[in-house]
Image: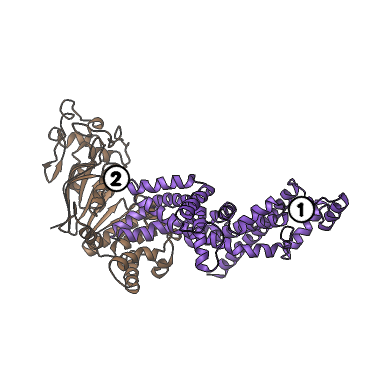
């Protein structure tokens, strides 16, 4: 790489990081203000139904700063977030950071296993669907995609839980598990429930991207030079079809994070998703804010990574990248 | 012995009114340059691809295609691969579409030697560098590391030619090799092809719509219309005295290379699609000399005439005079 290209790459990376920071800032404002406008008074929740005199409520409101003007509250919160202090959970009487840290590993395992399933089975089915187009296998893939895309994760969760968990008893139906093997055993059904819809989407994208690439003339050229079909598929079709697959994969990660709210609740797992449901229910706004911000941050980071990976997948993007 | 030989090749797609190829017979000798000329849709590309065992999916195929003595119609995968990796190679029309844009030019050039020929990377690269020099590229080591989008169309077509030569074929099939290029590069590419063909004594089948280009670069010419060969002869003969009205029409509709530019006479109408068929001569609707009741009754057979062959009912009456007139 010449010094000028290095400069250009560094420049575009810096622009991306700046863009990321601005996106997160705007998001933090939107998240904070939407919860500010949400109905319900956290102070009355804090007294937990015990009858409290207006004076007591006022004291609580002052202690937590509920009556400060909006910009002041936002500023306090933002200042804290920037210092790594996400606030305190009213519900758990812990710092939000500690509350999240305790539940993050379970969710990461769940999303990780689901992502692995999607990458292997979703992409695999897409490849088979494209190569076997017009045959019985190809039609079966299309059928599965249509059914999969139509099954909401809560339905998948309920069905899987009742069939494989309750009736057949192959998998536990509740909880997170203890050691690694037990955790994987616990996470299997939730991961499948979480991945079904997204897998269908990835299969569909993989299939159509592969079909697009199969039609390219360079594929025929490679075949005309005597390269085995399997080699041509791997080197020239699948390799070239990666772009849309990676893009969609990146978009799905944050979608999965949101869907953990349903799946974790359905399987009684303790993770970020079930925490979100619980805290929305109990008006623990500090935690809700932190989770929403976390989801957005993951979304922004993953998509920035996808953008940065794209030039490696398609060198033509590298050439055009300098102009943007 | 011919390096390439077609005998009554028939290719038909189910549901189409007429076959794509209807009894095509054609041969190319070792060291001979032969052109197959026709409009788009005439079946010339399908003919060329058949020599590599690349046939349209689902097509019904009859007749024979032999490359270096090996029969390709109904052949097993090993025979087809042997033809593709040592007997015949194809140069395609658009090098920008024909070379994978996300892989390096070096990958394209060496993959056949490494993945099928079992050569090491170093051996393959040495061979490829030599070929890149032979096709006149200025900086072979650098080109190996470049991506296709970093090269011009003319340079890429040279890469394509080098890629076609890596396996040391005895036959080069060139499908409109200059059509997608700038006019200035077209002549260079044709010159390179001709030089390499002569030096290595290769058989060459040039697919083109340009009768003048065909005559300038090839020894013999076949003219194709609606899936059939309608005229064949030496390049000089065909250009000086075309005998099929279609050949004459092709010549009359393109500007002459030398001499004064006279008015161009287009061939009226358009070629028959695969959805159309006719009991008689396929050129009937567009022919100046068509005789209803005769030309639209039965397809004219390809019959010897002088040194060449012509498929026209009225060829004897028209002789040279009438066909010459419309030039």
Distance (Cα) linking label 2 and label 1: 87 Å
Residue ranking furthest to the top: B293
In the structure shown, which secondary structural element does the residue marked by tag 1 occupy?
loop
**In this picture, residue B283 sits left or right of residue A199:** left
Q: Residues within 10 Å of mark 2 (few under 14, many from 20)?
A: many
- State the image coordinates of residue A35 (x, y, percent, origin top left): 72, 50
**In this picture, residue B295 sits left or right of residue B164:** left
Same chain check for tags 2 and 1: no
Dot 2 and dot 1 residues touching (CB under 8 Å)? no
Location of residue B313 by image quarter: top left
**Front residue of this view, candidates B137 and A272:** A272
**Front residue of this view, candidates B45 and A278:** A278
- State the image coordinates of residue A222 (x, y, percent, origin top left): 33, 58
Q: Nearer the viewer, mark 2 or mark 1?
A: 1
In the structure shown, which secondary structural element does the residue marked by tag 2 occupy?
loop
How was this image coloured? Answer: by chain
> In the rendered picture, chain A carries what hue?
purple
Residue A148, above or below B200: above
Residue B202, above or below B181: below
- State the image coordinates of residue A10 (x, y, percent, origin top left): 60, 66
Determine the residue positioned at 23% across, 34% down.
B283
- Does residue B196 show up? yes
Residue marked by disc 1 = A48
Residue marked by disc 2 = B209
Numbered label attached to residue B37: none
Location of residue B12 by image quarter: top left
Q: Which chain is brown?
A: B
Chain identity of mark 1: A
Determine the residue positioned at 23% across, 58% down.
B77
């Amino acid at each position: 790489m010449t010094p000028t290209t290095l400069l250009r790459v560094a420049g575009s990376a810096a622009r991306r990081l700046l863009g990321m920071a601005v996106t997160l800032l705007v998001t933090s404002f939107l998240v904070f203000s939407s919860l500010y406008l949400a109905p319900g008074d956290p102070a009355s929740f804090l007294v937990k139904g015990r009858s409290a005199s207006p004076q007591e409520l006022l004291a609580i409101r002052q202690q937590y700063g509920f009556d400060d003007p909006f910009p002041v509250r936002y500023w306090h919160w933002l200042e804290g977030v920037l210092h790594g202090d996400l606030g305190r959970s009213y519900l758990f009487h812990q710092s939000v950071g500690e509350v999240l840290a305790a539940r993050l590993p379970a969710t990461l395992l769940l999303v990780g296993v689901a992502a692995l399933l999607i990458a292997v089975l979703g992409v695999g089915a897409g490849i088979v669907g494209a190569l076997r187009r017009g045959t019985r296998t190809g039609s079966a893939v299309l059928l599965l995609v249509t059914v999969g895309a139509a099954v909401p994760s809560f339905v998948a969760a309920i069905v899987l839980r009742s069939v494989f968990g309750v009736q057949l008893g192959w998998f536990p139906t509740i909880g997170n598990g203890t050691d690694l093997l037990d955790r994987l055993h616990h996470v299997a059904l939730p991961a499948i429930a979480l991945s079904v819809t997204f897998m269908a989407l990835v299969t569909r994208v993989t299939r159509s991207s592969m079909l697009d690439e199969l039609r390219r003339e360079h594929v025929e050229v490679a075949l005309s030079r005597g390269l085995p079909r399997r080699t041509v598929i791997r080197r020239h079709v699948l390799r070239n079809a990666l772009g849309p697959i990676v893009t969609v994969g990146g978009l799905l990660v944050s979608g999965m994070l949101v869907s953990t709210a349903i799946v974790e609740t359905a399987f009684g797992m303790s993770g970020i998703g079930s925490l979100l449901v619980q805290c929305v229910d109990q008006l623990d706004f500090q935690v809700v804010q932190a989770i929403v911000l976390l989801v957005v941050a993951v979304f922004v980071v993953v998509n920035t990574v996808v953008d940065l990976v794209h030039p490696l997948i398609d060198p033509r993007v590298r050439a055009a990248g300098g102009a943007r | 012995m011919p390096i390439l030989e077609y005998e009554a090749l028939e290719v038909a797609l189910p549901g189409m009114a007429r076959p794509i190829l209807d009894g095509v017979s054609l041969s190319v000798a070792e060291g001979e340059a032969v052109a197959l000329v026709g409009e788009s849709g005439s079946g010339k590309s399908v003919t060329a691809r058949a020599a590599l065992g690349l046939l349209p999916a689902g097509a019904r195929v009859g007749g024979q295609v032999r490359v270096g003595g090996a029969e390709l119609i109904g052949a097993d995968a090993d025979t087809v691969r042997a033809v593709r990796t040592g007997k015949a190679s194809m140069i395609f029309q658009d090098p920008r579409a024909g070379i994978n844009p996300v892989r390096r030019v070096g990958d394209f050039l060496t993959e056949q030697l490494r993945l099928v020929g079992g050569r090491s990377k170093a051996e393959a690269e040495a061979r490829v560098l030599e070929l890149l020099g032979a096709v006149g590229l200025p900086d072979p080591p650098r080109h190996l590391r470049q991506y296709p989008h970093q090269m011009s169309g003319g340079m890429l077509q040279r890469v394509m030619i080098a890629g076609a030569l890596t396996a040391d074929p005895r036959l080069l099939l060139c499908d409109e090799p200059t059509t997608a290029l700038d006019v200035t590069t077209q002549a260079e590419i044709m010159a390179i092809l001709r030089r390499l063909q002569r030096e290595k004594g290769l058989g060459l089948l040039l697919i083109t719509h340009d009768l003048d280009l065909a005559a300038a670069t090839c020894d013999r010419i076949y003219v194709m219309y609606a899936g059939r060969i309608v005229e064949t002869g030496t390049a000089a003969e065909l250009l000086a005295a075309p005998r099929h009205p279609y050949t004459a029409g092709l010549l009359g509709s393109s500007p002459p290379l030398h001499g004064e530019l006279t008015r161009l006479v287009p061939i009226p109408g358009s070629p028959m699609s695969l959805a159309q068929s006719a009991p008689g001569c396929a050129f009937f609707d567009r022919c100046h000399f068509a005789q209803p009741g005769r030309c639209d009754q039965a397809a004219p057979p390809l019959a010897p005439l002088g040194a060449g062959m012509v498929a026209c009912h009225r060829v004897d009456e028209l002789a040279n005079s009438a066909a010459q007139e419309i030039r």
